[in-house]
Amino acid sequence: MLVGSDSLPSAGLHAFHEGDTCHPVEPSTLPVRLQTLGFAAVMVAVDDVLMFTARKAGPAGDKQAP
């Protein structure tokens, strides 16, 4: 199971990361990116932050939720 969250792009986020590397995840690309890596049952929610869950696909590439 993979569970994660990320900040959404904003001026404040970029100011906080001034001088270092900041690459926020684009929520609309996350499902395909995770599926390409072999994850299934991908769920993405966007509110004040990006939240996501996914699980490794079964042996036959099962993409159904458990």
Image: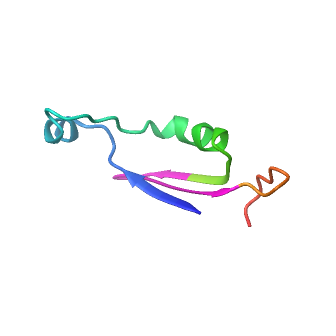
Q: How many marks?
A: 0
Give 55 or 8, whichever is nearer the viewer. Answer: 55
Q: How is the image coloured?
A: rainbow
Q: Residue at x 59, y 54 (%)?
A: 43
Q: Magenta stretch containing residue 18, yes or no?
A: no
Q: Tell me: 16 left or right of 61.
A: left
Q: Is 5 situated above or below 20?
A: below
The boundaries of the magenta stretch are 44-56
Give 47 or 34, whichever is nearer the viewer. Answer: 34
Q: Position of residue 36 (x, y in %)?
A: 65, 38
Q: Tell me: 30 left or right of 42.
A: left
Q: Residue at x 14, y 32 (%)?
A: 19
Q: Going by the picture, which residue comes out furthest to the bottom?
A: 66
Q: Is 17 situated above or below 50?
A: above
Q: Tell me: 22 left or right of 3.
A: left
Q: Going by the picture, which residue comes out furthest to the right?
A: 60
Q: Magenta stretch containing residue 52, yes or no?
A: yes
Q: Residue at x 25, y 37 (%)?
A: 10
Q: Main secondary structure of the magenta part?
A: strand
Q: Position of residue 22 (x, y in %)?
A: 28, 36
Q: Tell me: 26 left or right of 65.
A: left
Q: Position of residue 34 (x, y in %)?
A: 59, 44
Q: Specify the quadrant of the image occupied by residue 24.
A: top left
Q: Residue at x 62, y 37 (%)?
A: 32
Q: Is 7 situated above or below 58?
A: above
Q: Specify the quadrant of the image occupied by residue 25.
A: top left
| Quarter occupied by the C terminus | bottom right
| Quarter occupied by the N terminus | bottom right
Q: Going by the picture, which residue comes out furthest to the front?
A: 59
